[in-house]
């Protein structure tokens, strides 16, 4: 089995109000709510997962909703600044009208790398884009009553990192992760892996004078890359250690196994396995309907449930 990074696994961001976050992504954006659990390091806080029907790698957007009144993040260097979703060609008109209906802040469609895209902000100020991929995307979308397959998101198209210098980060992508530079537009450099057809792109934006960003409400916490299994995960741990970077031991996140390291530009990277998946503790039909706790917190379930706000 080849030791390869298979594009993006998931992206995790920080939100404020839990109910507002749940409503925006499951109702307005039309993603499937696939897991309601808690932050394993802070069980008094939710951890939400949104994705396609089964929570396929490359579709999973997760949130730590820390509650109202938390400090607002500040966009800047050393952080992931834009999350790009793939949508069908011709669907941006639908999304503009939908964003107007629900008072979502957005910009008029524009184009980069030959692809039409629509930028918008979630209620906490997180910047996202809907992109009409020029290569097409045949991933099966999650449908809702209002967001049908002909317009629904397919999963991630790309993630954008803003950096003072792209050199060291690009080296991680190319020398360790196997990505290649495939295009450039002024100070935006597009890297991609050929191991997967979708969720394969990382854009690096170089802004030499940009101030350091601050990760808090409305910003990306970390970007996770996908590997097939634990054996390949530990292969990459060795590679990153040999490269001279600090990396965590393997951590069991119940639905995948993970390693974390901070790449030289300042962005927190994770490498995560496909196994065991989101049906390990509830059926496909029940995904997202019940509060799932890791074993170490099950004895505190009553206190945790009493503390967490009801969202649905």
Image (cartoon, rainbow, N blue to C red):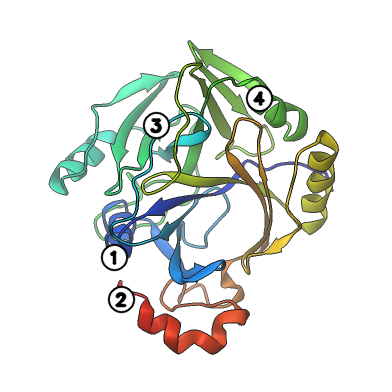
Q: Is residue 29 above or below residue 292?
A: above
Q: Closest to the observer: 228 or 94? A: 228
Q: Which of marks 1 and 2 is nearer the N terminus?
A: 1
Q: Which of marks 4 and 3 is nearer the N terminus?
A: 3
CB within 8 Å, label 1 to label 2:
yes
Name the image quarter holding residue 307: bottom left
Kindly report the distance in space between the C-alpha atoms of the residues bearing marks 2 and 4: 42 Å
Q: Earlier in the sequence, mark 2 or mark 4?
A: 4
Q: What element carries label 1?
A: helix
Q: Earlier in the sequence, mark 3 or mark 2?
A: 3
Mark 1 crowdedness (10 Å alpha carbons): few <14, some 14-19, many ≥20: some
CB within 8 Å, label 1 to label 3:
no
Name the image quarter holding residue 279: bottom right
Q: Quadrant of the C terminus?
A: bottom left
**Residue underneath mark 2:** 310
Kindly report the distance in space between the C-alpha atoms of the residues bearing marks 4 and 3: 25 Å
Kindly report the distance in space between the C-alpha atoms of the residues bearing marks 1 and 4: 37 Å
Residue 19's tag is: 1
Residue 169 placed where, x, y %?
A: 65, 28
Q: Does 263 sit left or right of 240 as displayed?
A: left
Mark 2 crowdedness (10 Å alpha carbons): few <14, some 14-19, many ≥20: few
CB within 8 Å, label 4 to label 3:
no
Residue 206 placed where, x, y %?
A: 52, 19
């Amino acid at each position: 089995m080849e030791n390869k990074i298979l594009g993006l696994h998931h992206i995790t961001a920080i939100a404020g109000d839990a109910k507002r976050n749940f409503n925006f992504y499951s109702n307005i954006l039309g993603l499937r709510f696939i897991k309601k659990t808690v932050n394993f390091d802070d069980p008094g806080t939710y951890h939400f997962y949104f994705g396609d029907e089964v929570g396929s790698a490359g579709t999973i957007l997760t949130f730590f909703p820390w509650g109202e009144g938390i400090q607002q993040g500040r966009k800047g260097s050393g952080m992931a600044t834009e999350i790009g979703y793939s949508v069908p060609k011709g669907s941006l008109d639908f999304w503009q009208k939908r964003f107007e209906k629900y008072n979502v802040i957005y910009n008029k469609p524009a184009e980069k790398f030959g692809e039409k895209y629509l930028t918008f902000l979630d209620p906490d100020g997180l910047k996202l884009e809907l992109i009409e991929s020029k290569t097409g995307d045949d991933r099966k979308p999650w449908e809702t009553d209002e967001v049908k397959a002909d317009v629904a998101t397919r999963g991630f198209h790309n993630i954008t990192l803003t950096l003072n210098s792209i050199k060291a980060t690009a080296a991680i992508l190319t020398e360790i992760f196997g990505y290649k530079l495939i295009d450039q537009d002024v100070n935006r450099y597009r890297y991609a892996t050929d191991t997967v057809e979708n969720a394969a792109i990382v854009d690096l934006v170089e802004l030499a004078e940009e101030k350091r960003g601050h990760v808090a409400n409305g910003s990306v916490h970390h970007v996770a890359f996908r590997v097939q299994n634990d054996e390949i995960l530990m292969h990459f741990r060795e590679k990153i250690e040999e490269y001279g970077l600090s990396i965590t031991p393997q951590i069991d996140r119940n639905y995948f196994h993970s390693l974390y390291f901070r790449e030289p530009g300042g962005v927190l990277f994770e490498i995560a396995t496909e196994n065991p998946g989101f049906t390990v503790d509830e059926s496909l039909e029940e995904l997202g309907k019940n509060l799932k706790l890791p074993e170490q917190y099950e004895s505190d379930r009553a206190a945790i449930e009493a503390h967490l706000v009801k969202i649905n």
